[in-house]
Image (tube, rainbow, N blue to C red):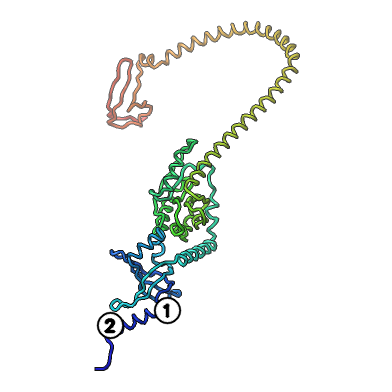
Amino acid sequence: MREHFTLSQVNGLLAAAITRLPFSNCWVLAEILQVNQAASGHVYMDLVEKEGSKTLAKMQAVLWSGRYAFLRTKFRDKLPHFLKVGSKVLLEVKIDFHNVYGLKMTINDIDPSATVGEMELRRQETLAKLEKGKYFDRNNQIPLPDVIQRIAVVSSAQAAGYTDFIRHLQTNKYGYDIKSKLFAASMQGESAPESIRKSLAQIASHADQFDALAIIRGGGSKFDLDCFNDFQLAVDIAEMPLPVITGIGHERDDTIADLVSHTAVKTPTALADLVIDSLLHFEQHLVHAHQRVIESTRTLLHRHQQQLLQLASRYELGASNLLERKSQQLTTLKDRLMIASKTTLNTERQKLGYLSKIVGLLDIESTKRRGFSISRHKGELITDAASLKKGDVIETEVHKGTLHSTIKSIGNG
């Protein structure tokens, strides 16, 4: 038998060689291709290096449960953003070669700078695409109503920012009645952009029912707010048929959603103040307009009052002479009128007596006493026999009583 090594000996030599390498403990920059957390708490990942669509290198890595717990305490809610598929990560690793499981990298620490840098790169690429498509001024061209009283709200129902927004609206010290309708959506994580877009589509189909659209979150880290840098979400916001107001809750950098919206404020409470202020400004405008009308009316009345006083003094003397002359004429006309009115009264009294006799003859009851009758079909007066048909029942009023008849035949003419 030739001289040989056993498989375990080969693996042992490789393990020893790797241990002696100067970079067995080092920082590695890679993209997460796949990640899975086992029931034991260990996190297993496939790491990859790409150049375009070409894969240059690939290796497995593991983050043991104890170290995962340490990093979760260190980074808190940011850790899931570092360890998601597609993220570029800078990892401190120890390269091991196990006799059974082969080559593997054990993760010891994470440097967020690579992930943050990758996020910023994607953000700049998205901004460039939006600029090329001229999306930044689209929503801003929709006029914001002077009075914002019907608001469509996109938020998570459980978000503290949404609760603050609603409470601020409902307890406004002016007593304004402001109506809002929630279109619930996920506001964090990979599913957030699509969830928000679905709510925007629902609102767009009922745009005539609202004055504006509010997107509310309530703060968070740069990673928490990264969903608001999604390109397609930004396009949907820009093309909304309503003015979009964002109150996402950041204090420093604007998200892309802020940049394509009509108006961006820092917090949900500030958004509520904007709505309340729109009503307050409109009310103040009405009050000032009312005061201007009152002042203008008073000025106009005073001017006309002065004109009337001048006219009164001008015509007072002439009116006195005219009154005396007209009084004399009135006396003469009065005498003539007395004579004429007596003659006219006698003539009209005779006419009235004659007309009274005619009216008495035309009275319905008098007419029925002379043998005439009134016929109805279904409550309607019968004036045309052609409106009836054989078998119809008609009601006929005579002087004393009512007759019910059934039509047997209808003659022509």
The residue sitting at 48% across, 44% down in the picture is 272
Please name the amino acid that badge 1 sits on.
Answer: Pro
Disc 1 crowd, CA 10 A, few/some/many (<14, 14-19, 20+) = few
> Which residue is disc 1 drawn over?
22
- Where in the figure is residue 214, as x and y percent of width and height? 47, 49
> What is the quadrant of residue 29 in the picture?
bottom left
- Where in the figure is residue 381, as x and y percent of width and height? 37, 25
- Where in the figure is residue 68, as x and y percent of width and height? 35, 64
Secondary structure, mark 1, is: loop
Q: Is residue 360 left or right of residue 309?
A: left
Above or below, 395 relative to 44: above
- Where in the figure is residue 297, as x and y percent of width and height? 64, 28
Above or below, 145 relative to 237: above
Cα distance, mark 2 to mark 1? 24 Å
Secondary structure, mark 2, is: helix
Above or below, 128 relative to 314: below
Q: Is residue 220 left or right of residue 370?
A: right
> Which residue is disc 2 drawn over?
8
